[in-house]
Image (spheres, coloured by chain):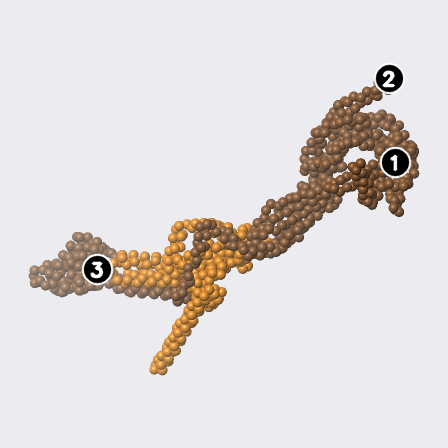
Amino acid sequence: MKKYFYIIISAIFIISYNNKIKSQNLEFQAYVSSKVVKVGEQFTITYQLNNKVDNINIPSFDNFQLLGGPSVSSSSSIQIINGKVSQETSYGYTYYLRAIKPGKFTIPPATVAWKNKTYQCNTIEIEVVDEKSIQQTPSSNEKKGNTSNITGEKIFVRVHVDKAEAYIGEPITVWIKIYTKLSLSGYDQNFKEPLFPGFYKENVDIPPLTNLERENIEGEIFYTGLLRKFILYPQKSGEINIEPFFIDVVVRKTMRRGDIFDEFFGPMVSDEQMTLKSNSLKLKIKPLPPSPNSFTGGVGRNFNIKSYIDKNIVKTNDAISYKITISGNGNIKLIELPEIKFPSNVESYDPKINFKKTGETSGTKSFEYILIPRYPGKFDLPSIEVSFFDLDKKNYISYKTDSYTIEVEKSPGDTSLIYTGISKEDVKIVGKDIRYIYTKNIKLFKKNDFLFSKSIFYITYLLLSLFLILYIIFRKQAIRKREDIYFIKISRANKIARKRLKYAKKLIKENKTQEFYEEISHALWGYLSDKLLIPIALLNRENVYNELKQKNVDNEQIEKTLKLLDMCEFARFAPINTISTDLQNTYNNSMEIIIELEQQIKY
Amino acid sequence: MNWSNKLNIKTMKKVFLIYIYIILSSILYASKLDSLFQQANTFYAKGDYQKAIKLYDSIIKKGYVSPYLYYNLGNAYYKLGKFGYAILNYEKGLLYTPYDENLRYNLELAKAHTIDKIEEIPEFFLKKWYRSFVNLVPSNTWAIISLSFFILFITCIIFLITYETKIKTLLFNIAILSIIFSIISFINAGKRKNFITAKKYAIIVVPSVNVKSTPNEYGNDVFILHEGTKVEIIESIGNWKNIKISDGNEGYLPLNTIEIIE
């Protein structure tokens, strides 16, 4: 008994507790059983609330026939998460309606009053399709050709794109849908979707297909389901054909036999496997206009670029985080940063790239650089310019980040800075100290005081050279003077000799033998002295012989000359009768010798 | 005649006095510089390197130098941890005494503290030999050697043209050799002088500097150099220097980042 009691107490407690935590807001929503209905078809509209209300003011369901309602239902669920109890209760008010005429209709919102407040629910749009038009469409659609392929079938798949024409890099949304009038009992979940050559493909997560929605396709009601969705980023320009793909589906067919069994067992049901072929597509990809240098592939809308830096003043070997963020709508994921030239005394690492999606085609891409300055000083982080192709303006827009100046201070304990370049061998030397200063008195000299750059140095050379030249000139002149005397002597030798001989001829006539020989002797000796430049003091037989020999005079001639000289000498001092009296002959002889010598002695 | 002679003696006296004055004052001035040097050394010994540097610099500013002065100045900078300036002064000292062992030793130590390790392209051995030959004696010594040989040459020639002697060939050979020696020494005197005055090399004195591809701020960074690295100056364009490092790379540096070895 006690046990039951406790359970009851706790149940009461829970209920009373629940009342306390009941939501303070009223959630009020409207749903319809299907958004596309046939004329004459019955459907329901349900108003759902999370609190009980007294009265719902439903709108007047014009264009529809109200069949009945409201039928009230309620459901509640209790959740205990980490000891926290929450209860959700919902109340549904369902009305039954029937579509009367075709068209698109809007059901205005219903209102409720709760805690002195009036709440409104959402509006609902409903499409009503005329059944008769469905029956007519097959024949009319057949003529349309292309569309008949779609509506002619009871089940088909289609590839949709949001645009058939795009720029390179412009995102294209693609979705694959299945349309059926038959009851679909299954499909190949891993079907091969078409290939998209020249595109970068990104899948979009969609909820798994559980129930099909009704949709009006050209006047026919189809049950449709989204199979896949993805975004394409074109990578190259041109017309690109997307080939159709195939998918296996299983449909359930009911076969009415039209006999009594139907009424007992229901219609006969069979599953049938079919292979569906999708449509093909043609996408036209336009190339981008000529791009500026700062363009890095970004195509889209609402771009923005920002840069952050975590500190402006840093110590050596401390890291700085330099972050650049690009946000916008477009191919954000594919955008690169232009190459950043960091100052070379700063160590930089490859950026950490982070991409965050904020929508189907929008997102934020961040590049985080870690910079480590190794040396004290100042350095600039330059502004970065990035250009994007704006799809609205159909032109390039460039954005610039801020530039930063970073001051690097030497960290106090940083001794490694100085020794970084020292190899092991060098460190040994570092342990030693430099040699002590020179303490003796030194000879200081004037800086840049060079003899070589002083004119006195060159003048000395010049004077010495001048002295040598003058000396040489003086010497030459003295020599020439002496040579001139010789020349005169030589040229006069013949003349003097002839003069003497002339005188001798006179003596022949007077028959003065002694004087004649003397004159001849004088003439010859004098001639030889002048001609051979032998000073009178050195004039003797040997010297004459040597000189003549040196002057290359014939031996015969020398012999002759010496013989004559000897004869003259002999005649001068010998008694008169012993000497030859042929004076004329002697004269002729000496004349001949002088003529011969004149010819043979050459300078 | 008499009075003009007297005047001559008077002017001679005046000139003589001026000479004595100049010699004396220069001796006094030199001794003043010497005392400055010793004072600086005292500061160095005490460990007051800043003051030592100031005094050493004041001597250099007066136009007087010595390899030992640069050596001491380099040491003071070394002790302060300014290795760029230490290297600069050692290099300056080595301009005058390229083979001084102390300078070379301390320079190596200072270089061990620099960051850049640049591969040096080895010099052609003949060039190296020739350079060490040129560096044997200072420029002025080469000049005096050249002049002496020239005088010997002239003496030989005069002897040759004046007297007829039996050592004619020997004299002629001596004349030829002495004129060759004179020319070589003359060239060496010029080379040695240029070596000191060329301002061909510089030392980087800032912690680090980007070498640009063009002589302005907007050039690309070609490479990076650090304090104490020796660069060769190729050309000056305004406040920028076209420099080359020993591995053959070239670029531009602003003037205020380097100090020229002169």
The reply to whether the C-beta atoms of the residues labelled 1 and 3 are less than 8 Å apart is no
Q: Amino acid at mark 3?
A: Leu
The residue that mark 2 highlights is: A260
Q: Position of residue B35 (x, y in %)?
A: 42, 70
- Element under disc 1: strand
Q: Read off the chain for label 3.
A: A
- Element under disc 3: helix
- Residue lying at the far front in this picture: please name it: A1
The residue lying toward the viewer, choosing from A253 and A261, is A261
The residue that mark 3 highlights is: A532
Q: Amino acid at mark 2?
A: Ile
**Spatial separation of the CA atoms under disc 2 and disc 1:** 39 Å
* Rendered residue at 31%/62% (across/down): B152
**Spatial separation of the CA atoms under disc 1 and disc 3:** 170 Å
Q: Amino acid at mark 1?
A: Val
First along the sequence among labels 1 and 3? 1
Q: Read off the chain for label 1.
A: A
Which numbered marker is on residue A102? none
Q: Read off the chain for label 2.
A: A
* Rendered residue at 33%/61% (across/down): B149
Q: Position of residue A455 (x, y in %)?
A: 41, 65
Please tell me whether residue A33 is drawn above or below residue B220 in the rendered image. Answer: above
Please tell me whether residue A568 is drawn above or below residue A337 in the rendered image. Answer: below
Q: Position of residue A428 (x, y in %)?
A: 44, 52
Give the class, few, some or many, for how many residues have Cα within 10 Å of label 2's Cα (few <14, many ≥20): few
Q: Position of residue A518 (x, y in %)?
A: 14, 64
Hue used for the chain lettered B: orange
**Spatial separation of the CA atoms under disc 2 and disc 3:** 177 Å
